[in-house]
Image (tube, rainbow, N blue to C red):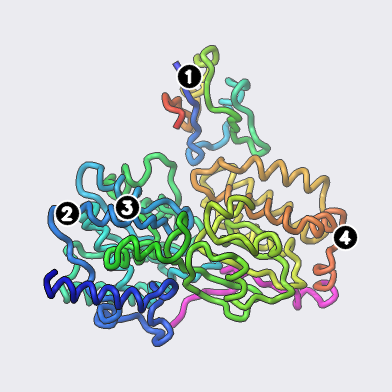
Amino acid sequence: MNRWLRINPIACTGHGLCAEILPELIRLDEWGYPILPSSQVQEHLLPLAKRAVRLCPALALRLDREAK
Amino acid sequence: MTAGRSRHAQAGYELARRLGTTSRLTYGWRDSDRPASLRTHVARYGPAPAAVPGRTGWLIDVVTEAGLTGRGGAGFPSGVKMRSVARQRGPAVVVANGMESEPASDKDEALLSRAPHLVLDGVALAAAAVGADQVHLALPHDKRWLAAALRHAVTERTHARLDPVPIEVHGLPHGYVSSSESAVISWLNGGEAKPTAVPPRPFERGVDRRPTLISNVETFAHIALIARLGPRWFRRAGLPDAPGSMLTTIGGAVTAPGVHEIEAGTTIGELLELGGADRDASAVLIGGYFGTWSRIADAARLPLAKTALKRIDASPGAGVLLVLPAGTCGVIETARVLAWLASQSAGQCGPCMFGLPAIADDFAQLASCRPQGRVLDRLDRRLGVVTGRGACAHPDGTARLARSALYAFAADVHAHATGRPCLQARRARERGSSARVRMLPIPELAGTRSRP
C-alpha cells in the first residue's frame, strides 16, 4: 500500500529526529529543518516512517494515503 | 418581444458601448475622485439583476462561460471556485479580499475608493449564487478612511434594502503575508492574520468551518458586470485564454504612474508605452515583489497573461509593472526588497523564518560588493532549498524574485560577486549614498500610504 509522508511546516520546529530515524527519506537543511526530496514512502521503509511520525516531538509529521 | 424586454436590451447595448473594452471598472473615474454614491453607481451601470429564487446557478454558469479568472494574483478560474463552494453542504460564506499588501500595487484601493458599489454588487450576487448567509469584506486596518468609505456604501445599500445578507467590513492587521486567503480566514475565525497549513482549502472548510468563497475585490467587480452584460460581452476584451479587462498598477520610471484598466493580454511593450516608460530603461519587474525581473527587450512582446508569461517564468500577479530607471543598480534594488520580504515572514515555518534572512543577507553582500565565500553558489543552493517549503507561497515568491534578478542582471551580479561594483552602483557611490536612487516602494521607507 502506498503512503506519502507529509510535513506540516508550521508545526515543525526542527528537532531533526525524523532525519535520524529515516535518513533514507529525510535530510536536514542548514537550519535543521527536514527536506523530503520525494514524499512517497517505499514499502520497506514504512515501519521507520511510522516510527518517525510517532516520535516527532512537534506532531508535525503524518502519513497520507493520497499523493495529494 | 415585449416593450419591457426591448427597453432592457437597448439599455444593455448602450451600457456596453459606453464601457468599451478598457473603461469597464474605471468608467467615470476621471470625472470624480470620490467614491461613487449608490445613486451615481446605478446611473452609470443600471441596477444589478435581481436574484431569481430557484435559479441560483445562473450566475455561476455565466461567470464560467465568461472565463473570468481571479484578479488577486493566482488567476484561478472564478466559475470553478464558485461552483466548488456552491456544491458543498450547508450555508456558505463569502469573503472579498481587499488587503492588497503588495507595496507596488494600488489597484484594489483605487477600485474600492472610486467604485465601491461595483465591488459590493458582485459580492452580493456571488453570495446569492453560492448560498451564503455571511458576507465579509477584508480591508487593511491602517487605511481607516477606506473602511469608513466602504461602511458608508454598505449603509447606503441597507437603506435601499439591496442586500438580503448584510456585508460586514473588517480592518485586519497589515503585513505582506496577511493578505493571503488562509491568513484572512484565520483572522475572521478569531486567530492571527497569518497563513495556515492547507488543506483544508477554503471551499471545503473556511470561515466558521463552512465552505467559503474568498476572492480579490476586483474579481467581484467583474462579476457585477458579467451579471449585467453577459459572458460574450466580457470576452469582447482580452484574449480567448485571458478574457476581459484588468486593472494594472504601473510604476517606477514612467511618466504616468498609477492604476490603468487594460485588456487582459495587452503586451508589456504596450503597457510601458501607456505608462510612458523611460526609453532608456532596460529592466521591468513583472507581477510585484513576488514577481520576476525581466529585460524589457525579452518581455516587451509578451502579453500580460498567465500562460504567455510562463515562458519567462513570470506571472501577471496582481497586475503590477515596475520599470527600473536607467542608471539604477538592479542588484541593490533587489537586495532592499529581499530584506523587506524577509522581515515580512510570519515566522511560522523554519525554512522561511531562517532561509529568507539568509538569502537577503547573501544579496546584501552582493549589493555592497563584499561577498563572503562563494556567495553565488550559496544563493543558488538556498533559493532551491526554501522553495515549496512554507505553508504559504512567501518563500517561493521571494526566491523567484531573487532568482530572476540573478538572471536579468547577470552581468552586474557577476561584477558585484567579484568585488567590483557595476557601472550604476559605482555612479551611485560617487554621488554619495544619500543620492542613491531608490525606486522600489517599501512601506517602512515610504511611510504609510494612507490618505486623509
Residue B314 coordinates in the image, percent (x, y): 60, 54
Q: Which residue is mark 3?
A: B213
Which is closer to the viewer, label 2 or label 4?
A: 2
- Residue B145 appears in the rendering: no
Residue A67 coordinates in the image, percent (x, y): 46, 28
Is B10 drawn above or below residue B133 in the view shown? below
Question: Looking at the image, which residue is at 71% across and 73% down?
Answer: B325
Q: Which residue is mark 1?
A: A50
The magenta stretch is B429-452
Cα distance, mark 2 to mark 3? 19 Å
Marked residue chain, label 2 = B
Q: Disc 2 marks which amino acid?
A: Arg
Query: Which is nearer the eye, B426 or B273?
Result: B273
Is B40 drawn above or below residue B420 in the view shown? below
- Residue A17 appears in the rendering: yes
Query: Which is nearer the eye, B88 or B263?
Result: B263
Which is closer to the viewer, label 2 or label 3?
A: 2
Which is closer to the viewer, label 1 or label 4?
A: 4
The reply to whether the magenta stretch includes residue B442 is yes
Q: Which residue is mark 2?
A: B55
The reply to whether the magenta stretch includes residue B183 is no
Q: Are marks 1 and 4 on the same chain?
A: no
Cα distance, mark 1 to mark 3? 36 Å
Marked residue chain, label 4 = B
Earlier residue among tags 2 and 4:
2
